[in-house]
């Protein structure tokens, strides 16, 4: 980037931030006109002029040369946005490109997720039915070459870029599997559309639907497809799992929530200083399906997942079980800049159908505390609203569940093993071949547990013998999950884990409460209708 173009990028960013009527491309919030470029002769506000003068002084007088990328991408723009709120942020061109790719929900490549394991690029998961899956790559493989070019000194994003390419072209991937095996795969690239939606039967009539994120434009379609393939007419109860769902596109949250509501019911509204209130309604409705729903959430459920939880709770359509959600109810608008970068800037706040605010307070604490030190009840007693059947609900602190369920918290021993990727490395080293003869009820035996114990000692991971014994059941579950991921893929491994998840089992036991909620709503509406006819 030249110095002139860097200054232009800064100037454009400043105009976008302070311009009350600037443009906004649809992402997390509403769609408004795109920002128009401003000519150099246009008059700038006093604040922008002061900012530009300060930047010019730094550029002209700083003791060392000033790389524009560092001063703008790492300094001026992110620093300015950090003074606004915890969620406004700056995306450099690479980050912005990746976000757009995720939004589209598809790309051309081999179909696997790679990440850094220390200095190595490793395969974390291979997408079902992808070219990589059909070729034989698997979780745990260490990528060493792409098209005969050594990539061991590259980071995962650069390796991922090399794996992508036009549909129908081929790429050769060489991996190290286990301590000694070296394997090469010739893979033909294809369209990849990974889905974070899955649905399957837990038991007769009771279905399970999980949504990992709302970050692509295909989420609502995937939900429809999965429920149709499952046979939704046979569903007598649904466990809807939004635990750990960080959010994403408001359009997808509205579509997913709306398909469980009645056509025309409010899903969410948003209000901001620079734009009129916008109300989102259910466009299609539930197509006559009125089975009870138990919705699982936790403290990591945020943003779009809170929109869904709030809408289904306010309309008494679901019985919410778990922990109070994160409390992220700020609408981020997307402002493209020159040089391929973009701003994600808060432009409004979300409100549930009853009118309660989703956003948790951030003005009276540090951003670190906001993200990592959540204690006590965050709901605002002054923001009390009522569901369709008259139940009290509160705003200002996320979505409070109808029924609390606190998942067991990890201990220090578990944290050390997770941080060291102990299970991933153990299985990669000791089970380099595909695990054989695994069934749904398989459990690691005493020999495997002892082998894992010895492996931890060899890797100098500190622990006391009492730690190992107290966590023996937890260790067995993690080893089982890791081996299942290698044998069946991450999706099938997740399904097997769900069937033994105590919170899911608790949710099944709460389905009668969800049914009672529907019956209470019917009685309330019948009484209201009777009064209206008098």
Image (cartoon, rainbow, N blue to C red):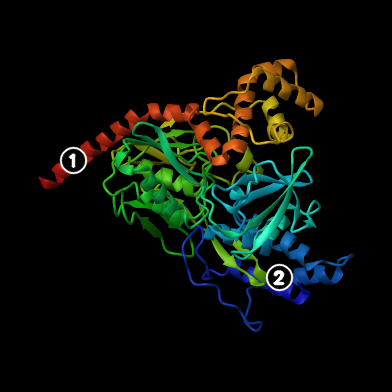
| Rendered residue at 79%/39% (across/down) | 180
Q: From the viewer's perspective, is the residue at label 1 or at label 2 nearer?
A: 1
Work out which quarter of the rendered image holds the N terminus and state it: bottom right
| In the image: residue 488, left or right of residue 91 | left
| SS assignment at label 1 | helix
Q: Is residue 382 visible?
A: no
Is 258 above or below relative to 323?
below
| SS assignment at label 2 | helix
Residue 201, position as x, y percentages in the image = 40, 36
Residue closer to the observer: 513 or 139? 139
Residue 166, position as x, y percentages in the image = 62, 66
Is 201 above or below relative to 39?
above
In the image as oriented, which residue stretches furthest toward the right? 63
**Residue 202: quarter of image:** top left
**Residue 53: quarter of image:** bottom right
Residue 147, position as x, y percentages in the image = 74, 59
Residue pointed to by mark 1: 526
Per the rendering, the mark at residue 288 is none
Q: Is residue 451 visible?
A: yes
Residue pointed to by mark 2: 50
| Rendered residue at 48%/58% (across/down) | 217
Residues at circles 1 and 2 in contact by the CB criterion of under 8 Å:
no
Residue closer to the observer: 401 or 161? 161
| Rendered residue at 84%/72% (across/down) | 60
Work out which quarter of the rendered image holds the C terminus and state it: top left
Between disc 1 and disc 2, whose residue precedes? 2
| In the image: residue 520, left or right of residue 503 | left
- The Cα atoms of the two marked residues, 1 and 2, are separated by 63 Å
Residue closer to the observer: 204 or 518? 204
How many neighbours does mark 1 have within 10 angstroms: few (below 14), some (14-19), or many (20 or more)?
A: few
Residue 447, position as x, y percentages in the image = 69, 19
């Amino acid at each position: 980037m030249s110095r002139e173009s860097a200054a232009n990028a800064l100037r454009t960013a400043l105009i976008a931030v302070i311009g009350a009527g600037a443009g906004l491309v649809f992402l997390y919030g509403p769609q408004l006109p795109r920002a128009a470029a401003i000519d150099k002769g246009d008059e700038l506000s006093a604040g922008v002029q002061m900012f530009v003068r300060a930047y010019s002084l730094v550029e002209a007088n700083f003791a060392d040369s000033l790389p524009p990328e560092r001063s703008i991408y790492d300094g001026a723009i992110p620093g300015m946005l950090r003074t606004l709120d915890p969620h406004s942020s700056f995306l450099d061109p690479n980050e912005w490109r990746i976000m757009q790719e995720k939004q589209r929900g598809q790309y051309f490549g081999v179909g696997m997720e790679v990440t850094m394991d220390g200095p190595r690029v490793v395969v974390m998961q291979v997408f079902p039915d992808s070219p990589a899956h059909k070729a034989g790559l698997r979780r745990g493989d260490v990528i060493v070459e792409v098209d005969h070019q050594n990539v061991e000194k590259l980071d995962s994003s650069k390796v991922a870029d090399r794996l992508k390419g036009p549909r129908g072209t081929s790429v050769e991937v060489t991996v190290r599997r286990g301590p000694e095996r070296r394997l090469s795969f010739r893979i033909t690239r294809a369209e990849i559309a990974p889905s974070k939606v899955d649905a399957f039967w837990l038991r007769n009539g009771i279905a399970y639907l999980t949504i990992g994120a709302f970050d692509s434009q295909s989420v609502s379609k995937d939900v429809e497809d999965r429920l149709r393939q499952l046979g939704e007419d046979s569903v007598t109860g649904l466990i809807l799992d939004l635990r750990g769902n960080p959010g994403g596109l408001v359009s997808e949250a509205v579509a997913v929530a709306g398909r469980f509501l009645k056509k025309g019911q409010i899903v969410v509204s948003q209000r901001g200083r620079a734009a009129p209130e916008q109300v989102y309604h259910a466009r299609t409705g539930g197509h006559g399906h009125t089975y009870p729903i138990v919705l699982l959430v936790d403290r990591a459920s945020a943003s779009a997942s809170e929109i869904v939880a709030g809408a289904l709770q306010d309309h008494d359509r679901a019985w919410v079980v778990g922990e109070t959600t994160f409390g992220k109810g700020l609408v981020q608008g997307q402002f493209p800049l020159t040089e391929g970068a973009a701003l994600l800037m808060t432009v409004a706040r979300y409100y549930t159908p009853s009118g309660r605010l989703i956003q948790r307070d951030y003005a009276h604490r540090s951003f670190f505390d906001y993200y990592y030190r959540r204690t006590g009840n965050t709901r605002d007693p002054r923001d009390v609203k009522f569901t369709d059947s008259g139940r009290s609900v509160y705003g200002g602190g996320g979505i409070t569940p109808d029924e609390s369920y606190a998942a067991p918290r990890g201990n220090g021993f578990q944290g050390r093993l997770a941080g060291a990727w102990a299970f991933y490395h153990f299985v990669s080293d000791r089970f380099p071949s595909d695990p054989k003869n695994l069934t749904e009820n398989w459990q690691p035996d005493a020999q495997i547990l002892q082998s894992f114990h010895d492996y931890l000692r060899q890797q100098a991971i500190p622990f006391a013998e009492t730690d190992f014994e107290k966590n023996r059941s937890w260790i067995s579950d993690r080893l089982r999950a890791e081996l299942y991921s290698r044998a069946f893929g991450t999706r099938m491994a997740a399904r097997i884990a769900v069937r033994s998840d105590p919170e899911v089992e608790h949710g099944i036991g709460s389905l009668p409460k969800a049914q009672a909620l529907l019956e209470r709503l019917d009685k309330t509406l019948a009484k209201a209708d009777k009064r209206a006819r008098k």
